[in-house]
Amino acid sequence: MSAKTITIFSNKGGVGKTFVAVNLGAALSIAGYKTLVIDLDFQATQDLARMLNVSPMKSVVDALSLFENSDDPNVIHECTARHSCGLEFIPAVKSLKQIGYITPETLKPFLKKASEIYDFILIDAGKSFSETVVTSFDHCNLILLVETPDILAVYQIKWCVEVLQ
């Protein structure tokens, strides 16, 4: 199985990226797809967990340490929080101390292993370009840009599209 990966991004805060990620993930799960939602937004950590009303005990960083002892991608399930609709959720980090452990070199193998066991992976990538976010772009099948219909947002999304191209 090879998951379809969708990175949800905007270079402006407060436009509804997390809302889209949660609802898209719930819809896919309800439709019967194995869905993983990853919170890669370091500037608004735990927003996804709050919106889903789940309390994850582990993070992507914890899953990476489990991979050192096992090649089985199913160990990811030990680190995810399951929502009542069926989707699984994992934050990239559980605390700010872990941020340094999420790099392109650590994110790539995690996404590769997750792709083996899920139908869809949704990544809430936050609002700023970083090496880690660009890595998620490189891995995904679709970049979903979310914006609001106001002049500043339209200007910023135009700039964002130019950067992505």
Image (cartoon, helix red, strand yellow):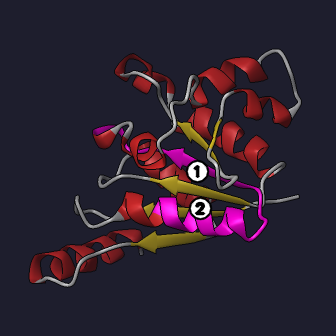
Residue 104 is drawn in which quadrant?
Answer: top right
* Point 88% across, 58% down: residue: 1
Residue 25 lies, in percent from the top left, at 59, 61
Residue 164 to residue 139: above or below: below
Callout 1 secondary element: strand
Callout 2 secondary element: helix
Residue 107 is drawn in which quadrant?
Answer: top right
> Going by the picture, which residue comes out furthest to the front?
84
**What segment is highlighted magenta in the picture?**
21-43
- Residue on which disc 2 sits: 25
The answer to whether mark 1 and mark 2 are in CB contact below 8 A is yes
- Residue on which disc 1 sits: 37
The C terminus: image quadrant: bottom left
Residue 23 lies, in percent from the top left, at 51, 65
Q: Residues within 10 Å of mark 2 (few under 14, many from 20)?
A: many
Amino acid type of disc 2? Gly
